[in-house]
Image (cartoon, rainbow, N blue to C red):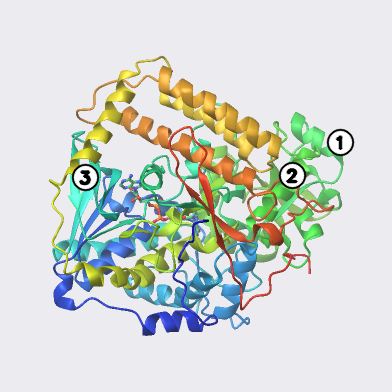
Amino acid sequence: MAKVIDSKIPAGPVPEKWKEYKAHQRLVNPKNKLKLDVIVVGTGLAGASAAASLGEMGFNVINLCIQDSPRRAHSIAAQGGINAAKCYQNDGDSVYRLFYDTVKGGDYRAREANVYRLAEVSNNIIDQCVAQGVPFAREYGGMLANRSFGGAQVSRTFYAKGQTGQQLLLGAYSSLSCQVQAGKVKLYTRYEMEDVVIVDGRARGIIAKNLVTGRLERFSANAVVIATGGYGNTYFLSTNAMGCNCTAAVQCYRKGAYFANPSYVQIHPTCIPVHGDKQSKLTLMSESLRNDGRIWVPKKIEDAKALQAGTKQGWEIPEEDRDYYLERRYPAFGNLVPRDVASRAAKERCDKGFGVNNTGLAVFLDFSESINRLGIDIIMQRYGNLFEMYEEITDVFPGDVANEINGVKYYKPMMIYPAIHYTMGGIWVDYELQTSIPGLFAIGECNFSDHGANRLGASALMQGLADGYFVLPYTIQNYLADQAVWPKVSTDLPEFAEAEKKVDAELDRLLNIKGKRSVDSIHKELGHIMWEYVGMGRTAEGLKTGLKKMHELEKEFDTNLFVPGTKEGLNIELDKAIHLRDFFTMGQLVAFDALSRNESCGGHFREEYQTEEGEAKRDDENYFYVGCWEYKGKGNEPELIKEPLEYEAIKVQTRNYKN
Ligand SMILES: Cc1cc2nc3c(=O)[nH]c(=O)nc-3n(C[C@H](O)[C@H](O)[C@H](O)COP(=O)(O)OP(=O)(O)OC[C@H]3O[C@@H](n4cnc5c(N)ncnc54)[C@H](O)[C@@H]3O)c2cc1C
């Protein structure tokens, strides 16, 4: 019999589901909270907000992260902003509209009820962060300012220059520090979760490695929450921080947690193009730049060839010879189409030979029109740090005048190209954010939840903080309400000893391979396979080839890896080797899912399934479900379990950004 997934979605139409849920929700008696321990793994926006909130509610929280401070979690990288349906611009925004845009942006592959709840709590997040002192940009009159992000025709993105993630994280960190000071949160920095411990079918603790001493330590609790971020670094080159890894999530998957929609990977259209083969990191130029920057390539192939040869510069090409291809193809949304659409359109132009740099893999993002209209000061107020970051990396300042043609000033444009950025797939969770393992919860980017097949800009911070501040702290209580009567689990149980022994044996195995190749050299090769065969354009044949190549490379990893040093003390290469072991599992999972989904939707583009105009062609009859994968052991194909999607409030249709 096929397995059934209980997603615990309450009955009734959206938005009554959420109200219904709240009405019947069990809350833990305040006295019992003092007896209950919760492990929160991760201190990004999702983890820090959850740990702070749970601590404030009275639970005892153990909070771990791999960095030396929660403030250095990957979330600080977030640049452009965070969405909320405040409608401060009086432009017709509403909770319903944010809900609708998010579901449509995700190409109708998200769970409707979850997204409605997300839209509803979005406004609370802004209030919470303002109360913490987050310095959001303001209008001259003092109101919070907004800008627009892709996939929306209203201005609902709140921002703090191009450093929104950092400012939000400082807000969450101050709340977290308050709970640390109050003794409700015990913080463990430079600790990495290596395994989840299951006792009698429930998550009861974790095994973590002290990254400084190298020692393995056991932690027990009444529930475990993972908030460990996404798996974008499987592709080696991505906009994610170097430390981002999927070890915790993959370990949970190996222990029985379903992994949902792994093939939904976001490729962001506006990143600084790859240059050379020595790079280990790609840099995002925030989507907010598309508010005022216009994306173009030359109309004439001879101009493109001259740009590629370096005999012409972008600012020498006059207005009438420029092809603003997004404005041409999608008049209603123009440069603000969703990321998957913009990325594919850039690839299409470059594949046709219109790329603008020496590799032919770049398009222009040009501020000439907006600087001429608004003046450089306003543009610098909005994007100053992004312009400076671009200059630091490329030695080109996009605010410099470069040419004047027919009285029109032309500024030096940025060059951009799509790159791996975000992962919509993740650990499967039900409506309460509980995984398929009782007592194990997943929040933030590491769960699959709200973005369907494509995330809209400024929605990750919204989801991470919604999960951490307003959803998990309540839904987890349904589970914890029963836990107060259970005796506390000891870390001396055989389940803990067994898990620790296995982790230790893995460390020995990796150290004892004593081959010839560094972790990075193998990881880079894996990244090439992923980009080539499991990247922006996928085909059944390519995915099969990719899987075969990954399999062979994994054998190379298992037999020819070289990890210097020992397991005692700090050993960064050993930690990276563990991450790479798990990127292999992840890469194969992405390919399996992509191969099983014979349709194109959002970030998952199968070249066999496209319209005549090159748009993604969904197959709702056969693929209107969340694809959940169950681990079946190394080298074996995982098993697909489907959670059918049910839409009540929104009519499922083909996405249209043209009119
Ligand atoms: C360059 C860039 C710009 C972005 N800009 C925006 C934006 O403007 N708006 C927006 O909405 N989104 C943006 N995003 C996406 C957004 O930043 C992330 O999706 C979000 O911050 C993820 O938060 P998180 O808390 O889920 O995970 P993370 O911030 O990745 O935090 C993960 C945490 O888990 C810990 N951890 C990981 N593994 C382990 C382990 N095994 N053991 C212990 N701890 C572990 C880490 O130490 C860290 O504390 C951007 C992303 C990038 C890369």
The mark closer to the camera, 1 or 3, is 3
Which residue occupies 33% across, 75% down? 131
Q: Is residue 187 visible?
A: yes
Residue 645: name its quadrant: bottom right
Residue 524: give x, y in percent of width and height.
Answer: 51, 29
Q: Amino acid at mark 2?
A: Glu
Q: Which residue is mark 3?
A: 495
Q: Amino acid at mark 1?
A: Glu
Which residue occupies 49% across, 79% down? 11
Q: Is residue 458 left or right of 153 when viewed as pictured?
A: left
Helix, strand or loop at mark 2: loop
Helix, strand or loop at mark 1: helix
Q: Nearer the viewer, residue 567 or 190?
A: 567
Q: Give the class, few, some or many, for how many residues have Cα within 10 Å of label 2's Cα (few <14, many ≥20).
A: some
Q: Give the class, few, some or many, for how many residues have Cα within 10 Å of label 1's Cα (few <14, many ≥20).
A: few
Q: Which residue is mark 1?
A: 302
Q: Amino acid at mark 3?
A: Glu
Q: Is mark 3 within 8 Å of ligand 1?
A: no
Up-down relation of residue 106 to residue 508 (above or below): below
Q: Which residue is mark 2?
A: 607
Q: CA distance from mark 1 to mark 3?
A: 67 Å
